[in-house]
Image (cartoon, helix red, strand yellow):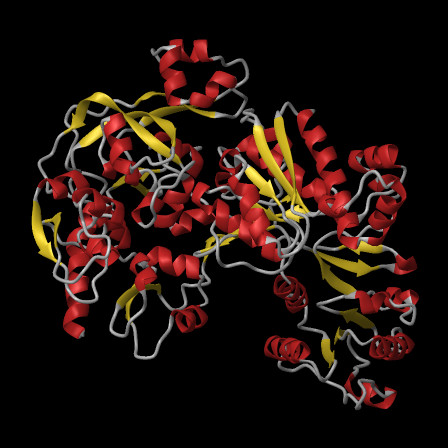
Amino acid sequence: MKKILLFFFVLFITTIGFAQQYKSHKVAQGENVYRIAKRYNTTPEAIFKINPTAKEGIKEGQILAIPVVDDQEYNVHVVEDGDTVYNLSKKYNTTEEAIYVLNPDAVNGINLGQILRVSILEKPKEENTATENVSDPILDSIKPLEEIRQIVRFKTHKVRRKETLYGIAQKYEITIDDIKKHNKRLYSEQIRKRDKLRIPIYAEEVVVEVETPKDTLSSRISTTTKYIVKPKETRYSIARRHGITVDELNQLNPEMDPNFPIGMEIIVPTTIFVPLEEIIEPEFELYEVQPKETIYSILKRTEISSDSLFNMNPYLRDGLKAGMVITLPKRGEIDSLAIDFPEGKYLKLENMLSNFKTKKLAIMLPFGLDTLDLNARQETEDFIKRSRGLQVALDFYKGIQIAVDSAKTRGLSIDLTVFDTQRNNNVPYIKNLIDQNNFDEMDAVIGPLYQANVEAVAAELKKYDTPVFSPISNRESKLYSNFFQTRPTDIMLQDKLIAYVEKDSTDKNIVIIVQQGKEKYEEIKNKLLIKFPDAKMPKIEEGNYVYGVHLDKVLAKNKPNWVFFESDDVAMISNVTTLLNARVESHKVTLFTTDKDDAFEDDSVKNEYLSKLHLHYPSIDKEFDNYDETRMTLFVERYKKEYGTIPSKYAVRGFDITYDILMRLGVADDLYHAATFEGTTEYVENKFNYAKKLLGGYYNKASYIIKFDDELKLTVIE
């Protein structure tokens, strides 16, 4: 087995030179990653991937490794006040048409601060072999480029029924490999009807020609050989071994027996190699499958999603066997963040708008129209009053409508389509809904509300890379890279409060009071004890209550007492807050909880006690139950005018999520690009700072710490 592992390793090393080429770039004054990406016709995400420290910022003189896309560089220009495409064409000695080719969106107008490619950057006559003398493992691995053809633009091709990659390549006079390079998922997936493919359109002449080994699909297929099917082999394993897809294997063997019998003679490419997309990157490693291991056990041990596992190892769809060599993230790398910026910096996206193309949004909410008889008015009204889910959906949608109207006043054009998901766990209906509508054209999908439904939508739309936003659920999904979780998880909220206490705990007496008998509270207690090993804990009596005499033993009189209290037992909360309130002044007590659930709202728990104890807790929103004049935002004023009442938290959330999405679409090429912006956005009650793990989708980690102030006021302190 070790010999097999060594063989795979050698193959990876010998092919890595052809997998990706790099250039070095020395950061100039005033440059940022987005501007550099424009210059080299790549993306900020691609630059961050091979320069991880750039996520923390770049500075003048720093050397970055830049992935080569078409070996072409561009002069870029930041649009200033008074600029027009005509003026820029004169300034840079080019034509308006050439600028439009390099910036297709410019036909809709250009905006202040927008970054444009204005001309192709001419290379020095003696373009050299001498590059920056920088010791960088990425730059040290630079290899000579293959024959490069200049890409002048991209065309979108919508796949029709019965179309094949071979036929599409023939139509545009390019190779199948040209298509795959710009549609990476096609290395592991087949094309489907209504897929949208990026088709490169090349200049007529070759820009660079260097005689180097080629590894294009056309060159492999040009030299074929006969192959005898062996026991346990499948179409997939043979295609993978020879660097082609099953569809391409079928094209080479149009009369192949569909039963795929052992001993059948077929035609395959002569070259045997490991597909380029499976070359091991630094954060991955080879792993030998052990006896009795299953896909489920590997997923559980590594905490990655099945979607990610199959993307790294597409041949696993044919089954897992002991002795297989598969690709996995290195241990310790699984939870590392691909994008993760601090909350401190706030962004005002309304002042940065530059992309005024029409934004297409799909809204998917459980209105349950299939259960209503709209002719029976009284019954319909009664149903609406009784149905909690429908009330939430209606309030959320009211917020969405106001967000869309508000974005339009900023000059954005929005095409909104609303779909009724009917009910929870309605996956077959939702799949049918997606099949019958043009979701591939959407810039984003908001909803559904329920976790099972929203994950089903993300799964169906992953092939289009359409972002899907989960608006209310706080359950994580590690399955899909197009999944945006807008609500921070309970763990994130816990960690935020603990970090807040930890940074100012040196002169405090930390006390921990935790409800007994529930696993989740044991976990919280253990987490707190790890962070505060010197913390004191009073004796908890059976039935979850505390005696005053035991509480006095752990409270200090010579320094402030910061008390963590974790419980959802109303009687225990009433008992402990009453005892602490009696000691609040003599012992300088401040109360903290990582989870202020509904039990704290019970009538048995006195709010005046929580106010005197200055209860601190984390929250996903500002939780303003009432809006005084200082909090009466334009949204609240308009909502009250239209509906005669203060908006619910769901209406506010509908507004904040939708308005944030529209603003992000207005300042970036798409929402994936917008997620790379450093900083936090904030609106009526919610704020957003999206991070992305190495594997999986995006999640919002922005939240608040709220304090009960004197006179029952709630104050945001962080």
Res 594 → quadrant:
bottom right
Q: In the image, what residue occupies the spot 61% across and 45% down?
A: 680
Q: Looking at this view, is 283 or 551 the one in front? A: 283
502 to the left or right of 96? right
Image location (x, y in percent) of residue 67? 30, 41
Q: Looking at this view, is 640 or 62 the one in front? A: 640
Image location (x, y in percent) of residue 131? 20, 39
312 to the left or right of 474? left
Q: Confirm whether residue 284 shows in the render.
A: no
- Identify the image quadrant of the C terminus: bottom right
Q: Confirm whether residue 310 shows in the render.
A: yes
> From the viewer's perspective, is residue 397 above or below residue 511?
above
Q: Looking at this view, is 8 or 83 the one in front? A: 8
Q: In the image, what residue occupies the spot 37% across and 43% down?
A: 47
> From the viewer's perspective, is residue 111 above or below residue 247?
above
Q: Looking at this view, is 35 or 163 the one in front? A: 163
> From the viewer's perspective, is residue 709 above or below residue 442?
below
Image location (x, y in percent) of residue 555? 79, 82
171 to the left or right of 693? left
Image location (x, y in percent) of residue 260? 21, 57
Q: How many marks?
A: 0
- Identify the image quadrant of the N terminus: bottom left
